[in-house]
Image: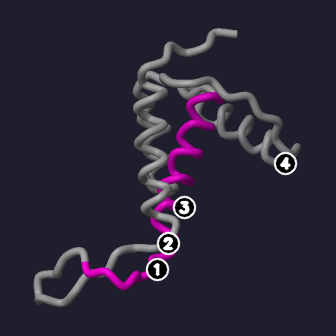
C-alpha cells in the first residue's frame, strides 16, 4: 500500500478487520494531533484503523527503500540472460524474520490485556 492510497481508502471506509497483536505507543504531541484530525476528517475510520493504515503504508515503503547489496553468488538470470546476484543487504533478513514472526503470531491468540 502507498501513502497516496490512504485518502481514497478512508473516504470509501474500506477496512478489513484488524487482527494480530495489540501495540501501545505514545506519540509526539504533533503526531497525536494529526491522527485525531484525520479521525475527525474521516469519521468512518477509527484512530486504530488510521494508525494501522499509516504504519502498513510506511512499512511497505521502507521495504522498497531497503538497499540491494549484490553478493558474489549468482542466484538466477534475468530475461536477457544477465546474472542476478544474491542480495547481501537487509532485505532478505527482513523478509525471513517477517515471515517467521508472522507464522508465530498467527499461531497465538491476541492478548486482551
Report which residue position mark 2 lands on. Answer: 89
| First in residue order: circle 1 vs circle 4 | 4
Report which residue position mark 1 lands on. Answer: 69
For the residue carrying disc 2, how many other residues have a C-alpha within 10 Å: few (<14), some (14-19), or many (20+)?
some
Q: Are marks 3 and 1 in contact (CB under 8 Å)?
A: no
As drawn, the residue found furthest toward the top would be: 112
Secondary structure beneath dot 1 equals loop
Q: Are marks 2 and 1 in contact (CB under 8 Å)?
A: yes
Question: In the shown orientation, is residue 21 left or right of residue 60?
Answer: right
Residue 103 image point, x, y percent:
40, 31
> Of the numbered discs in the image, which one, if any, rests on residue 7?
none
Whole-angstrom CA distance, mark 2 to mark 1, is 5 Å
Secondary structure beneath dot 2 equals loop
| First in residue order: circle 4 vs circle 3 | 4
Report which residue position mark 3 lands on. Answer: 62
> Of the numbered discs in the image, which one, if any, rests on residue 30?
4
Secondary structure beneath dot 3 equals helix
Residue 4 image point, x, y percent:
48, 57
Q: Are marks 1 and 4 in contact (CB under 8 Å)?
A: no
Question: In the shown orientation, is residue 31 left or right of residue 22?
Answer: right
Q: Are marks 4 and 3 in contact (CB under 8 Å)?
A: no
Q: Is residue 78 above or below residue 109?
A: below
Q: Are marks 3 and 2 in contact (CB under 8 Å)?
A: no
Q: Is residue 52 magenta?
A: yes
| First in residue order: circle 3 vs circle 2 | 3
Residue 67 image point, x, y percent:
50, 75
Q: Is residue 95 magenta?
A: no
Would you identify the image quadrant in which residue 77 lies? bottom left
Q: Nearer the viewer, residue 89 or 80?
A: 89
Which residues make up the magenta segment?
47-74
Amino acid at each position: 500500500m502507498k501513502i497516496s492510497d490512504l485518502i481514497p481508502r478512508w473516504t470509501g471506509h474500506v477496512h478489513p478487520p484488524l487482527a494480530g497483536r495489540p501495540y501501545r505507543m505514545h506519540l509526539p504531541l504533533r503526531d497525536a494531533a494529526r491522527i485525531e484530525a484525520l479521525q475527525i476528517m474521516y469519521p468512518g475510520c477509527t484512530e486504530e484503523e488510521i494508525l494501522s493504515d499509516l504504519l502498513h503504508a510506511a512499512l511497505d515503503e521502507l521495504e522498497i527503500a531497503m538497499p540491494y547489496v549484490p553478493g558474489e553468488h549468482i542466484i538466477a538470470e534475468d530475461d536477457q540472460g544477465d546474472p542476478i546476484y544474491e542480495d547481501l543487504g537487509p532485505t532478505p533478513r527482513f523478509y525471513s524474520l517477517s515471515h517467521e514472526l508472522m507464522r508465530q503470531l498467527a499461531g497465538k491468540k491476541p492478548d486482551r490485556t
